[in-house]
Image: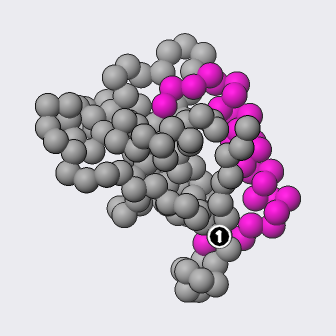
Amino acid sequence: MADHIRDAYAFPNLSYPWLAPADEEDPRAKRFPRTLHRILPDSGQDAENRKHVKKACKRKPPYERTGLPTPPKKGQDCDEWPFASTREGAANTYWDFSVRAVTRGVNRSAGTQAKNFYVDSRVLAWDKKFSKSRNDAFQVRISR
């Protein structure tokens, strides 16, 4: 997961889904957020984020020309950045997202770690009643 996130920031327009098909020029550089906001699984946006990820991983519309070249193989999952559990996930209309096929066990372990982080760090879920500055935010730091 760390490599995926690092690569998304280092080489944004090489991450899938592309902004434009290979035979067209990219309209702009992809944008990835630096700060994230947790959402709840029953928020509706969580499901929308996952729908976009699934479509990009399987090259389904609107990602049939820009999604992963081949879907994840047996024993792999489709990893996404930003996390589907965040307001900035794949369904967000301002931020871009990235998908990559990764080993299933590693991906699921990372998902469990994210859930544990939310609980252990007491990251509250996004609440539209509050301004952006009053909602909990967090950043993911990649280190080696």
**In the image, is residue 123 above or below residue 54?**
below
Q: Residues within 10 Å of mark 1 (few under 14, many from 20)?
A: some
Say whether residue 68 is left or right of residue 86.
left
Q: Is residue 109 magenta?
A: yes
Start-end of magenta stretch:
100-126
Q: Position of residue 133 (x, y in %)?
A: 59, 83
Could you tell me how many numbered marks the image carries?
Answer: 1
**Residue type, label 1:** Ala
Locate the C terminus by quadrant: top right
Quadrant of the rendered image containing residue 62: top left
Q: Residue at x 34, y 23 (%)?
A: 69
Q: Is residue 101 above or below residue 26?
A: above
Colouring of the image: one colour
Element type at mark 1: loop
Residue 86 point in image, percent of width and height: 57, 58
Main SS of the magenta part reads helix
Q: Quadrant of the N terminus?
A: top right
Q: Residue 51, can we see it?
A: no
Q: 119 and 17: which one is in front?
A: 17
Q: Which of these two is toward me, 58 or 4?
A: 4
In the current view of this chain or complex, which residue is farthest to the right? 120
Q: Name the residue located 74 percent from the left edge and 50 percent from the top edge.
A: 115
Q: Position of residue 64 (x, y in %)?
A: 25, 32
Q: Would you say residue 114 sits in the magenta stretch?
A: yes
The residue beneath circle 1 is 137
Residue at 65% from the left image edge and 32% from the top image edge = 107
Vertical relation: 116 (above or below) 109: below
Query: Residue at 50% across / 60% down in the picture?
Result: 33
Q: Where's residue 2, x and y in %? A: 64, 38
Please identify the quarter of the rendering in which residue 3 is found. Answer: top right
